[in-house]
Amino acid sequence: MAILVLGGAGYIGSHTVDRMINQGYDVVVVDNLLTGHRQAVHNKARFYQGDCRDRDFMREVFKVEPIEGVVHFAASSLVGESVENPLKYFNNNVVGMEALLEVMEEFDVKHIVFSSTAATYGEPEVSPISEDTPTNPKNPYGESKLMMEKMMKWCDEAYGMRYVALRYFNVAGAKSDASIGEDHDPETHLVPIILQVALGQRDYLTIFGEDYDTPDGTCIRDYVQVEDLADAHILALEYLKAGNASEVFNLGSNNGYSVKEMLDAARQVTNKEIPAVMGPRRAGDPSTLVASSEKAKNLLGWKPEYTDIQAIIKTAWNWHVQHPEGYQDK
Ligand code: UDP
């Protein structure tokens, strides 16, 4: 039997596929390659290029492949873009999920692990954030992911389709041998941008606001290493396979780092100056997002290997040094 990974050519998807193959899973990848990279997909995974909104294409994949479970990463994921173009997010993310659930129901596939986000919480006052913190998304991206979670919940009620929604906080790093890593175009994320400055590909980092209510005035986030995040998906599949009930889990580290602390850590790792300038706040950025991941640790048995922020950044740095232009397939 096989696991279908939708969006398996993306950043987190490709690391999850890699970990799954190395643990002996039979893996089928579907990706439309709009943002993913064919080269990022492990050569032992069977690859189909297509879109999960295309029901006929999806039916063909489910017909040919012995799929027993799905890991769903395929979605648009830029907060700013979602504010500018909400319908893109409701189409790609929500309509995509509806089509997927329809085909899963047709083929009697009952397990789905879903890539959700801390953006479902909005800007909660509490820290760290646990799963019972009320959801209140502040942008169409977070809203679309929360809608997708709710669609799975009602499909569980109606069809007994069980799900695990993994609400990620911030993810960073690359595979420890630097063979796969993060490559977005355009790049908007803090760690790759800092490292592109260290490589001389950008002149400086712009820090988005230093007037937040935090010790150094810059935003605080909770960074998880991508391989640790990938492992949580495999544990979630095993959790469903063991017959457990649908659940939502936060994935973070319980540790927050400010933008300035991340910059200092990257300076240590790279031994480069990394110039930075202050800029205005970025729309929609909450001041502090730190996860409590006790539930994932207790129920999934998740044990993140990387606890040191410099070690996380080092894996990203190795990837950027070895692949300064990313996958070079666009
Ligand atoms: N950030 C920044 N400059 C950049 C990119 C990001 O100051 O060029 C900040 C951003 O405001 C946020 C943190 O870095 O506080 C992490 O941003 P990222 O886009 O990596 O992830 P997000 O928290 O939006 O998921």
Image (cartoon, rainbow, N blue to C red):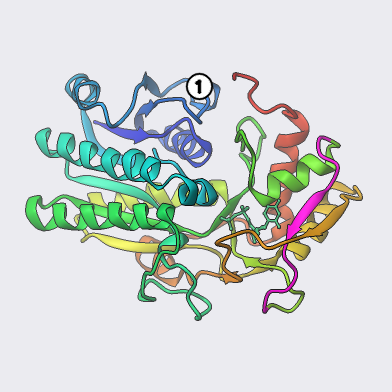
Q: Residues within 10 Å of mark 1 (few under 14, many from 20)?
A: some
Q: Is residue 72 visible?
A: no
212 is within the stretch colored magenta:
yes
Q: Is residue 274 left or right of residue 281?
A: right
Find numbered disc 1 in the image and state the secondary structure of the residue it sits on: helix
- Which residue is labeled 1 in the image? 38
Tell me the kind of residue under disc 1: Arg
Residue 160, how many percent across, how many down? 11, 52
Could you tell me which quadrant the N terminus lies in? top left
Residue 20, how many percent across, how many down? 42, 37
- Position of 34 relative to 158 (above/below): above
- Position of 173 relative to 300 (above/below): above
Q: Is residue 247 left or right of residue 324?
A: left
Residue 169, how many percent across, how many down? 52, 60
Q: Residue at x 71, y 53 (%)?
A: 311
Residue 73, how many percent across, how many down? 40, 41
Q: Residue at x 50, y 81 (%)?
A: 126
Q: Where on the image, by quarter, is ligand 1? A: bottom right
Residue 264 vs residue 239, the one in the foreground: 264
Residue lying at the far left of the rendered structure: 158
Q: Residue at x 38, y 20 (%)?
A: 47
- Position of 233 relative to 103 (above/below): below
Q: Residue at x 35, y 38 (%)?
A: 92
Is the CB atom of the residue marked by disc 1 within 8 angstroms of ligand 1's nearest atom? no
Q: Is residue 15 visible?
A: yes
Residue 83 vs residue 275, the one in the foreground: 83
Range drawn in magenta: 201-213
272 is within the stretch colored magenta:
no
Q: Is residue 118 left or right of residue 163?
A: right
